[in-house]
Image (cartoon, rainbow, N blue to C red):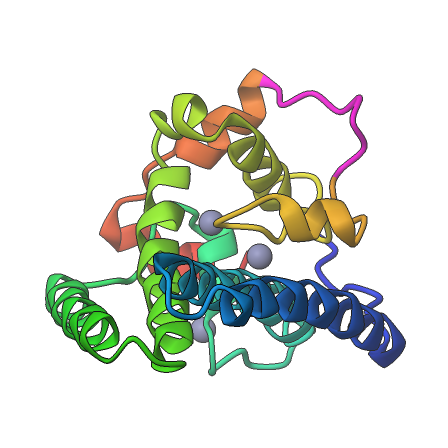
Amino acid sequence: MQTISKNSPRALQLCLIKASLIFAFILSLGFYAKGTLGYFIFLFLGGWLIWTFAEYVIHRFLMHELLIPGQKDTLFHHHEHHSNPSNLKVNFFHRTFTLLLGIMINWVAWERNSTFTIFAGFFTGFLMYNFLHYLLHKRVGKYLFPRIQRAHILHHTKYPNQGYSFSTILWDWLFHTLAPAHVQVTEKMRENYFKNFNKGQETKSHST
Ligand SMILES: [Zn+2]
Ligand SMILES: [Zn+2]
Ligand SMILES: [Zn+2]
C-alpha cells in the first residue's frame, strides 16, 4: 500500500489561505451580530469549522507524511489504524474525561459569552470527531453520513491519499482530495473495512 502523499509545503499554504478566508467570514458574521444570539452561534460554528480544518490538515499533512516505510509513526500510530481499521484505541476513561471537560468548557463559554466561545466550538468539534470516526467504522454510518463514509472506506482501502475528512466532506471537496466520482465501493472493500481483527492478531497486522 502506497501511503506517502505528495503534499508540498505550497499545498499546505494554499489550504491555510483558503480556509482562513472562510473562518474570517464566519467569525466576522459573529462579531457583526454582537449583542444577539448570533454572536454565540457564529463564534461556536467558526470554532467548530476551525477544528474540522485542523483535523483535515493533521490527517493529511502530519499523519500521512509520517507514514514513510521504515520510519516509526510513534506520535499518532495512524498506520496501526490503517492496518486494523476497527481498532480506534480510545478507552472509556479517555472518552468520559473529554466529555466532562467538553460540558464544562461549553458551560463556561455560555456564561462568559466572549471569544472563548470559539475555543468551545473547537473543542466540541474535537469531541464529535472522536465519536464520528467511531461511527464511520460502523455499518450504520452508511445511513448517517453516506458521503463521508464512502470517502473513508476508500481512504482505508484503495485511496489512502484521498478522503482525509471525518466530520465534514467540505475540505476534501474544496482541496480536491476526493477519490474520483466514478469509483465504486465494492463488497470486498466493505468486507475488509468492517472486519474485526481479534486482539491476538494485532501485532501481526502491524507489519502489513
Ligand atoms: Zn506503531
Ligand atoms: Zn478510520
Ligand atoms: Zn489515514
Q: Is residue 137 above or below residue 131?
A: above
Please indicate whether residue 130 sits to the left or right of residue 102 in the image. right
The answer to whether residue 207 is visible is: no
Image coordinates of residue 131 in percent, x first then y, are 30, 50
Q: Quadrant of residue 69?
A: bottom right
Please indicate whether residue 168 sits to the left or right of residue 109 in the image. right
Please indicate whether residue 49 sits to the left or right of residue 121 in the image. right
Q: Residue at x 71, y 43 (%)?
A: 159
Q: Is residue 107 above or below residue 189?
A: below
Q: Nearer the viewer, residue 48 or 194?
A: 48
Kindly give the residue lying farthest to the top in the view shown: 187
Q: Residue at x 48, y 64 (%)?
A: 33
Q: Quadrant of residue 112?
A: bottom left
Image coordinates of residue 125 in percent, x first then y, are 39, 61
Queried whether the magenta region covers residue 183, the answer comes back as yes
Q: Residue at x 16, y 70 (%)?
A: 107
Kindly give the residue lying farthest to the front in the view shown: 35
Q: Nearer the viewer, residue 74 or 126?
A: 126
Image coordinates of residue 173 in percent, x first then y, are 73, 44
Q: Quadrant of residue 124?
A: bottom left
Q: Nearer the viewer, residue 104 or 96?
A: 104
Q: Is residue 75 above or below residue 168?
A: below
Q: Residue at x 47, y 60 (%)?
A: 42
- Quarter of the C terminus within the rendering: bottom right
Magenta residues, dominant SS class = loop
Image coordinates of residue 123 in percent, x first then y, are 35, 70
Queried whether the magenta region covers residue 194, the answer comes back as no
Q: Which residues are magenta?
A: 179-186
